[in-house]
Each structure stands twice: as structure tokens, then as C-alpha cells.
Image (cartoon, rainbow, N blue to C red):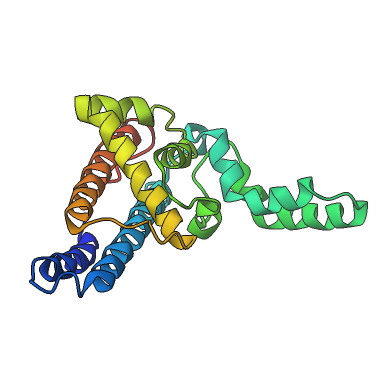
């Protein structure tokens, strides 16, 4: 992942300062660089998952995948906002208006066979996904119908699978603590280096197993 290079730049700057004889004097700067590294790393993991999803949406449309192969949950997420507007309403007039919007904008996308008549909105599909802990990533991929993500991830990484899951969750938890102003939520340059390696392993493994599933169930995405 090329985007991890900028996290490595921040970590490298912090590590360089930590190795000087003036490390104590630069303690606040080192901490700030490490905290920024964690926030940026978590953001990049989230962006990677979303981009993988967006690429898959494009592949489904470009390869004219028949909608009979698509999981029902997929359709909910391409229309989630319109569905929720209908479901949450209590006033018949507003419900009718929202129902008309759904019919006019989404109904053609919901046919059970044939290719999608228009490009699928990644903005709509990705809504609700953020803070990429492992279970949230698992839930995101289930939108496509991929329900064995955890199993395949653990098989792919063997004895390192669960520790990678735990470490990904720690990255996100640390990011959340930083975002909520916890002054103790920081990591050392060495710990940031381990986090970067965790992110690489997570993204590489996810890409491999999801692409394999797509190839067997939807279309090739790689």
C-alpha cells in the first residue's frame, strides 16, 4: 500500500528525534508524530476497505454480473437511505413521497435478473462504514454476500491470524482514544512500526481472500 509510506515518514521522523541526545527535549514532538501516525494509519485502513468495495462495485457493473448472483443484503445497502426514510416515517403523506422517490430512483436497480442498468453508487453503498475494526470489516464484506471472511482470514494467516485481528482492533481503539482527547493514548516509534506491518498484513490478506471469493461468486476483480 503506497499510502502507508506517509505514515512511515511520520514514524521515521519520530524515531530520528528519539535517537538524538535531545530526545527528552523533543518528547512532545515525538508523541505528536506518533499520535498522528496512528490516526493516519487507521484512516488509511478504512480508505483501503472502501476503495476495495468501490472497485468491486465497478467490476460488477463493467462485467455485467447478473443480479441473480447478488446477495439480497447488497440491494439494501445501495438503497439504504431511501429505505430508512420510508421505514422511519409515520406521516402517510411523507411516506408516500419517500416511496415515490424510491420507485423513481431505485426500482430498476432491484430487478432480480439481468445486469444493473446503471452504475452503483459507492457513496450510498459505503454509508455507515467507519472505524475499521475487524468485525466492522467483516460486516462490510457481508454486504456483498461474503459471509466467511473471518474463517478465510484465519485460515490464510494460520497462527498469526488472531493476533493480526487483535492488533488491527488495537490500532482503531488507539485512534479513537486519541480522537477523544486521551493524553495517554500514544505509541512509540517501534510500536508504530509494528502497527504499519500489521496494516500491510491485514490489507494484503483481505485483498487476496476477497478477490478469490469474488472470482468464484461474482466476477474477477484483479
Task: Tell me: residue 186, above or below residue 205.
Answer: below
Question: Where residue 118 sits: x, y (%)?
Answer: 52, 56
At 71% from the left and 49% from the top, the residue drawn is: 84
Mark yes or no: residue 119 visible: no
Q: How many marks?
A: 0
At 50% from the left and 50% from the top, the residue drawn is: 129
Q: Residue furthest right?
A: 92
At 20% from the left and 25% from the top, the residue drawn is: 159
Question: Where residue 101 sits: x, y (%)?
Answer: 74, 58
Task: Tell me: residue 206, above or below residue 118.
Answer: above
Foreground residue, 78 or 177? 177
Left or right of 17 on screen, residue 212 = right
Mark yes or no: residue 201 visible: yes
Foreground residue, 144 or 217? 144
Occupied quadrant, residue 188: bottom left
At 35% from the left and 55% from the top, the residue drawn is: 42
Foreground residue, 161 or 117? 161
Question: Where residue 165 sits: x, y (%)?
Answer: 32, 36
Occupied quadrant, residue 187: bottom left
Left or right of 112 on screen, residue 49 = left
Question: Where residue 72 sits: x, y (%)?
Answer: 57, 34
Q: Quadrant of the N terminus?
A: bottom left
Task: Tell me: residue 20, above or below residue 221.
Answer: below
Occupied quadrant, residue 6: bottom left
Amino acid at each position: 500500500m503506497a499510502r502507508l509510506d506517509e505514515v512511515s515518514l511520520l514514524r521515521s521522523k519520530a524515531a530520528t528525534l528519539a535517537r538524538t541526545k535531545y530526545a527528552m527535549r523533543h518528547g512532545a514532538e515525538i508523541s505528536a508524530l506518533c499520535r498522528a501516525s496512528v490516526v493516519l494509519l487507521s484512516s488509511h485502513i478504512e480508505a483501503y476497505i472502501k476503495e476495495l468495495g468501490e472497485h468491486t462495485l465497478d467490476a460488477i457493473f463493467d462485467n455485467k454480473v447478473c443480479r441473480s448472483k447478488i446477495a439480497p443484503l447488497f440491494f439494501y445497502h445501495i438503497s439504504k437511505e431511501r429505505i430508512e426514510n420510508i421505514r422511519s416515517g409515520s406521516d402517510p403523506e411523507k411516506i408516500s413521497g419517500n416511496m415515490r422517490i424510491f420507485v423513481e430512483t431505485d426500482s430498476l436497480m432491484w430487478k432480480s435478473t439481468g445486469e444493473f442498468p446503471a452504475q452503483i453508487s459507492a457513496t450510498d453503498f459505503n454509508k455507515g462504514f467507519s472505524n475499521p475494526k475487524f468485525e466492522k470489516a467483516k460486516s462490510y464484506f457481508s454486504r456483498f454476500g461474503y459471509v466467511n471472511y473471518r474463517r478465510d482470514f484465519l485460515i490464510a494467516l494460520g497462527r498469526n491470524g488472531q493476533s493480526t485481528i487483535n492488533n488491527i482492533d488495537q490500532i482503531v481503539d488507539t485512534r479513537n482514544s486519541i480522537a477523544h482527547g486521551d493524553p495517554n493514548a500514544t505509541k512509540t516509534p517501534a510500536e508504530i512500526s509494528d502497527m504499519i506491518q500489521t496494516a500491510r498484513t491485514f490489507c494484503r490478506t483481505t485483498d487476496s481472500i476477497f478477490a478469490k471469493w469474488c472470482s468464484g461468486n461474482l466476477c474477477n476483480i484483479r
